[in-house]
Amino acid sequence: MNSDIKEILYSQEQIQRVCQELGAKLTNDYQDKKPLVICVLKGAVMFMADIVRKIDTYIELDFMDVSSYGNEMESSGSVKIIKDLDVSVKGRDVLIVEDIIDTGRTLACLASLLKHRQAKSVKICTLLDKPDRREKTISPDYVGFQVPNEFVVGYGLDYQGFYRNLPYVGILKPAVYEKN
Ligand code: XMP
Ligand code: MG
């Protein structure tokens, strides 16, 4: 285990099990809908790669990079689009794949943008949900795990760009960010 990690919250095996379960639900819910599945870069990359391989129906993938004008530990109100989608969402069933929903500001902004662009439906699939800190009334449609109010990293989630490559989700030792 990486020495900056206080505790492993979800192991590789637990994550794979959840991807399997959510993938089965998504396969059923999106049968014949040919949804556009959107990965929010960069945090959701691992989850996206794992979950789409468990969806057994026609889906199209696209990627979006947004920055939320916050510091590295939390987001602010509005999002800036760093990389936009390549395809139009107009009339499409859209599924946003996210790593974590914290205050909900990022996804509230993104979901309303996609609705404004006339997506037929916009649903959210997040690996992690941290409901304690919610400020926006946004409830994800598909959730992997509910996490306690701790700063977590790994499996795509970062602190100052690092730890994304850890195969598990773990709690970062506060000493790591307190010294900065
Ligand atoms: P909001 O607050 O808009 O923010 O829902 C979601 C974004 O905030 C970041 N975030 C975290 N990143 N560990 C992380 O690595 C965490 O515990 C954490 N909490 C929030 C993340 O960028 C996410 O997309
Ligand atoms: Mg993110």
Image: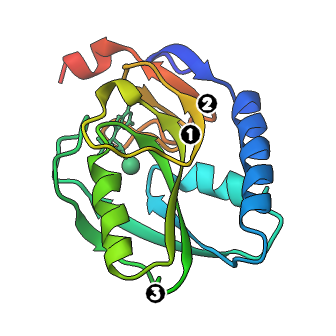
Is residue 57 rendered to the left or right of residue 96?
right
Give the residue at mark 1. Answer: 155
Give the residue at mark 2. Answer: 168
Identify the residue shown where x is 43% and y is 27%: 152
Q: CA distance from mark 1 to mark 2?
A: 6 Å
Give the residue at mark 3. Answer: 90
Residues under numbered marks 1 and 2 in contact, where contact means CB atoms less than 8 Å apart: yes
Q: CA distance from mark 3 to mark 1?
A: 31 Å
**Hey, what amino acid is under mark 1?**
Tyr
Identify the residue shown where x is 56% and y is 39%: 155
User: Which sits earlier in the primary sequence, circle 1 or circle 2?
Assistant: 1
Report ligand 1 position as a quadrant: top left
Closest to the observer, 168 or 69: 69
User: Which sits earlier in the primary sequence, circle 3 or circle 1?
Assistant: 3
Is residue 63 in view from this perspective? yes
Q: Position of residue 78 (x, y in %)?
A: 17, 57
Q: Secondary structure at mark 3?
A: loop
Q: Nearer the viewer, mark 3 or mark 1?
A: 3
Q: Secondary structure at mark 1?
A: loop
Q: Is residue 79 above or below residue 152?
A: below
Identify the residue shown where x is 77% and y is 30%: 13
